[in-house]
Image (cartoon, rainbow, N blue to C red):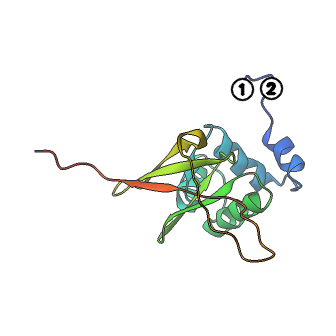
Amino acid sequence: MTKATEVSSEERLRHSGLRPTRQRVALADLIFAKGDRHLTVEELHEEAVMAGVPVSLATVYNTLHQFTEAGMIRVLAVESAKTYFDTNVSDHHHFFVEGQNEVLDIPVSNIHIDNLPEPPEGMEIAHVDVVIRLRRRNDR
């Protein structure tokens, strides 16, 4: 996106149905300034502290969940101890680099999923998340 077509954080929040409070705008600025990425609550809190944004860890947690509910980001659970938030809400899958806690996007066109089970009556499949775990080879 060029500067002329970039959406401000305030506009993004209003479009998603959220009131653009000072803290929400500041956190949205931090989240979306670097393009598509994956981050944890703790990583965003650290970025906020480094940027001089006075915000608690609980506020970052709550704000990320509000952004998720508004469809601005999505939750990505790749391991039980950490939840990542993904700024790319398009259909795509992920590599997870074990031991480095790094998440990388895989375009959805690179994976074809067939033979999904029928969902229970009254339900529909909303999304399929594929996480492929990677580790460094021990080549000698």
- Kind of residue at badge 2: Thr
- Which disc, if any, is residue 36? none
**Is residue 122 or residue 50 the one in the foreground?**
122
Taking the view exactly as shown, the residue that stands out farthest to the left is 140
Q: List the residue tagged with mark 1.
A: 1
Identify the secondary structure beneath mark 2.
Answer: loop
Q: List the residue tagged with mark 2.
A: 5
Query: Marks 1 and 2: in contact by CB < 8 Å?
Result: yes
81 lies above or below 24 = below
In the image: residue 98, left or right of residue 34: left
- Kind of residue at badge 1: Met
Q: Residue at x 54, y 45 (%)?
A: 111
- Residue 16 in percent (x, y) is at 85, 51
**Is residue 126 or residue 30 the one in the foreground?**
126
**Is residue 112 or residue 132 the one in the foreground?**
112
Taking the view exactly as shown, the residue that stands out farthest to the front is 115
Identify the secondary structure beneath mark 1.
Answer: loop
Q: Residue at x 56, y 47 (%)?
A: 112
15 lies above or below 55 = above
- Residue 92 in percent (x, y) is at 60, 46
Q: Residue at x 67, y 42 (%)?
A: 32
In the image: residue 115, left or right of residue 68: left
In the image: residue 48, left or right of residue 134: right
**Quadrant of the image containing the C terminus:** top left
Q: Residue at x 62, y 68 (%)?
A: 117
Q: Residues within 10 Å of mark 2 (few under 14, many from 20)?
A: few
- Residue 8 in percent (x, y) is at 80, 37
